[in-house]
């Protein structure tokens, strides 16, 4: 470990990447959340922690080191917080800054489960509260979701997508409104920076039973640039931590109305620049495929629409049969059940176990007379096992260290018992990872025999690591027909454990690309020799999502779940950098009796964008200018704006709805209210059509006043389209 850490530090130093060298690195981390498992190791846990800290600091990197969730970190290491909320966190010394190293803006997704979603308003509330209460640095986990390519997904049983509901989604597209709302939050906090860094600590003011303000006062810089209230720097955060009710509070002689579970940010202690619960950023609905249809339980977070009429990627496929069981000359036989990872050394997800048992006529008669079936019992297994008897699949079981009782059909004479143990990602958290293992634990036996159970635990077992196709690298682009590929007829009878291969052209343009594997069962896939990950068509439970999500109140990973009754993951990301214009090679290993003819390919892009902004909303943050802080300016006299933007290279092709007045509903469900400016559509169309982005002022000066003495809102829904040469192209 010391050699590794020293190697990394030396590399960073050689490239002049540390801040004292003019580079971007201001902090280093040693270990991660070791404090959660330290006690499992007794006195040696603390001893190791101290050794790691001393070793790291001794490398002379010249920047501070942190330990996340390490309450007993030494005085020369900064202990930091990882959580959904860190405003209440305090480091173990007053000399240490308050740092939030992991702000969980989503959560992990597992096969067969609902998808976690964290509301935009709540994460903004958490961040604002952190800086309100003296926070120094906040870091997202994750800011860009990304993908677990290859076999890198952990968990175990975490899905290939690592989208994590992050502000930048798995495909690199903006997740709106989360990205836009966070951008505005960052800008508002940045406006407070002069006061935040000038004050040693904030002044606390109680404003109500669940309302409070924290005020940062400081002395202005010598140039006098940052002048504000009383000729000094002043920034304030006003919070309403009530989970249900709005609150009106008085602060410095002015009244402020705060939505529940929200924080207002006042960079000059007077004007509100931002409120965490008031989202002015657009909502983006992303699409894949052709003619749009809404699917799934997406009313909660309408951020994806699947398109119908997707053409299959190819009707011309080659196939290769994967042998069941022992296939190579590197198999070996051993007495007893060996631990999975000890045998595979993680070269493959797959490990075959083969043994042979003898069944007498008396056993057959006993089962027939008593109308019972023998079973194969496994005390404990993970993550997935398939049980074959005499070449036929008897059953499959998934779980983490669960008991297996599988009825089997045996014949008189010798019977081959073949077990396929599969890992679906390795255990990636907790103490004693090296002891967790995989495969089988405890006893393995055949029950129900006339003379009692047969203990298979001590039998002779032949072991075979991996798939023949894996070790022959049939997924390689240079794999030829000599590997045994044959043409797959359209009317082929599906069979288990088959390899499939085809060629396809990449969709035009530069939008991200995905494959739809919803027609398959379980397996792995490669594009041009690059492993795009495991796939598994498990469906989430139908219940547990809810029609709406209330952002108010403390978040947890079971709150605001989506995707009920739908596949946990259907679409799989292929980076554009892996693709050629044509003749791309797709190879699939499919474990079940599914064929590849319905696999489709498509680009992913933002098609529909919506926004709703009130004339009483805060002015855009770019209107704030430090030079205007003369103690008299009221930014509330400035006009709020709506900002709309399509993906890079796309333009706003049509305005599907626009109403200035009191429109009803939400994105994709807008309707006009009784108050409506007749010129709404023409004004928005003129400002936005044909552009990648546009800005519209929200005021009577822009639209006229359709109804006096009513607070007006502008609601807009627009369509984004790719360049003309791509807008009519179909999926392959």
Image (cartoon, grey):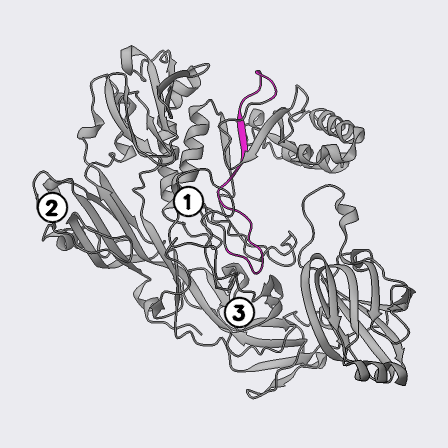
Q: What stretch is highlighted in magenta?
A: 92-114
Q: In which quarter of the image is residue 23?
A: top right
Q: How far apart are marks 1 and 2 (CA)?
A: 32 Å
Q: How far apart are marks 1 and 3 (CA)?
A: 29 Å
Quarter in which the N terminus is drawn: top right
Q: In this view, does 53 lie above or below 414?
A: above
Would you name the residue on which mark 2 appears?
A: 703
Would you name the residue on which mark 3 appears?
A: 517
Residue under the point 36% across and 72% down: 729
Q: How crowded is mark 1: few (under 14 residues within 10 Å), some or many (20 or more)?
A: many
Horizontal side of residue 372 vs 234, given as left or right: right
Q: Residues within 10 Å of mark 3 (few under 14, many from 20)?
A: many
Quarter in which the C terminus is drawn: bottom left
| Lower sequence index among marks 1 and 2 | 1
Whether residue 467 is visible, yes or no, is no
Mark 1 vs mark 2: in front: 1
Q: Does the magenta stretch include residue 455?
A: no
Residue under the point 74% across and 64% down: 404
Q: Is residue 717 above or below residue 451?
A: above
Residue under the point 34% across and 37% down: 277
Say which of 326 and 56 sits in front: 326
Q: In this view, does 623 lie above or below 74?
A: below
Residue 295 rendering spot, x and y as whole percentages: 40, 65
Secondary structure under tag 1 reads loop
Would you name the residue on which mark 1 appears?
A: 119
């Amino acid at each position: 470990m010391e050699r590794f850490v020293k190697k990394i530090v030396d590399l960073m130093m050689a490239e002049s990447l540390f801040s004292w060298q003019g580079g971007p690195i201001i902090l280093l981390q040693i270990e991660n959340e070791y404090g959660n498992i330290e006690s499992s190791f007794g006195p040696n846990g603390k001893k190791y922690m101290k050794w790691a800290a001393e070793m790291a600091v001794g490398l002379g990197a010249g920047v501070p080191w942190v330990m996340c969730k390490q309450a007993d970190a030494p005085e020369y290491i900064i202990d930091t917080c990882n959580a959904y909320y860190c405003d209440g966190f305090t480091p173990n010394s007053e000399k240490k800054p308050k740092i939030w190293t992991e702000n969980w803006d989503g959560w992990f997704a597992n096969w067969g489960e609902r998808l976690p979603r964290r509301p935009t308003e709540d994460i903004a509330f958490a961040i604002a509260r952190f800086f309100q209460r003296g926070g120094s640095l906040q870091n997202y986990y994750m800011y860009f979701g990304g993908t677990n390519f290859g076999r890198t997904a952990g968990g175990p049983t975490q899905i290939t997508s690592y989208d994590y509901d992050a502000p930048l989604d798995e495909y690199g597209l903006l997740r709106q409104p989360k990205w836009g709302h966070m951008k505005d939050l960052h800008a508002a906090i940045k406006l407070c920076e002069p006061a935040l860094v000038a004050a040693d600590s904030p002044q606390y003011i109680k404003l109500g039973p669940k309302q409070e303000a924290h005020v940062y006062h400081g002395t202005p810089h010598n140039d006098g640039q940052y002048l504000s209230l009383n000729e000094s720097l002043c920034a304030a955060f006003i919070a309403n931590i009530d989970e249900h009710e709005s609150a009106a509070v008085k602060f410095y002689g002015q009244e402020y109305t705060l939505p529940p579970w929200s924080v207002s940010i006042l960079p000059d202690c007077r004007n509100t620049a931002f409120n965490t619960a008031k989202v002015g950023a657009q909502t983006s609905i992303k699409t894949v495929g052709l003619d749009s249809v809404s699917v799934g339980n997406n009313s909660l977070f309408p951020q994806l629409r699947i398109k119908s009429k997707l053409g299959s990627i190819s009707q011309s496929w080659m196939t290769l049969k994967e042998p069941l069981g022992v296939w190579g000359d590197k198999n070996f036989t051993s007495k007893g059940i060996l631990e999975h990872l000890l045998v595979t050394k993680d070269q493959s997800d797959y490990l075959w176990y083969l043994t042979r048992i003898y069944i007498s006529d008396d056993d057959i008669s006993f089962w027939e007379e008593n109308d019972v079936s023998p079973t194969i019992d496994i005390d404990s297994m993970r993550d997935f096992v398939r049980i074959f008897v005499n070449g036929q699949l008897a059953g499959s079981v998934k779980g983490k260290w669960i008991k297996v009782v599988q009825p089997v059909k045996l014949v008189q004479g010798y019977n081959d018992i073949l077990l396929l143990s599969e890992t679906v990602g390795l255990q990636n958290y907790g103490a004693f990872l090296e002891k967790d293992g995989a495969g089988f634990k405890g006893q393995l036996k055949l029950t129900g025999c006339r003379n009692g159970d047969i203990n298979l635990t001590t039998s002779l077992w032949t072991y075979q690591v991996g798939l023949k196709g894996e070790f022959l690298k049939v997924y390689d682009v240079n794999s030829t027909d000599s590997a045994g590929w044959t043409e797959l007829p359209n009317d082929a009878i599906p069979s288990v454990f088959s390899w499939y291969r085809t060629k396809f052209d990449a969709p035009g343009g530069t939008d991200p690309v995905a494959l739809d594997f919803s027609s398959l069962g379980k397996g792995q896939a490669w594009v041009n020799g690059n492993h795009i990950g495991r796939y598994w068509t498990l469906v989430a439970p139908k219940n547990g999502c809810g029609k709406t999500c209330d952002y108010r109140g403390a978040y947890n990973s079971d709150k605001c779940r989506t995707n009920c009754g739908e596949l946990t993951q259907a679409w799989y990301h292929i980076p554009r950098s892996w693709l050629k214009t044509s003749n791309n090679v797709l190879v699939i290993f499919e474990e079940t009796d599914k064929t590849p003819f319905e696999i489709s390919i498509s680009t992913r892009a933002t098609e529909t964008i919506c926004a709703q902004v009130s004339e009483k909303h805060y002015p855009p943050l770019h209107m704030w200018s430090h030079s205007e802080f003369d103690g008299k300016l009221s930014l509330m006299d400035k006009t709020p704006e709506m900002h709309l933007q399509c993906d890079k290279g796309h333009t706003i092709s049509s305005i599907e709805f626009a109403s200035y007045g009191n429109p009803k509903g939400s994105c994709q469900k807008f309707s006009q209210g009784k108050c409506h400016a007749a010129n709404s559509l023409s004004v928005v169309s003129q400002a936005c059509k044909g552009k990648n982005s546009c800005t519209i002022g929200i005021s009577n000066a822009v639209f006229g006043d359709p109804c006096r003495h009513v607070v007006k809102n502008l609601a807009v829904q627009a369509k984004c389209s790719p360049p003309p040469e791509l807008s009519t192209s179909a999926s392959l």
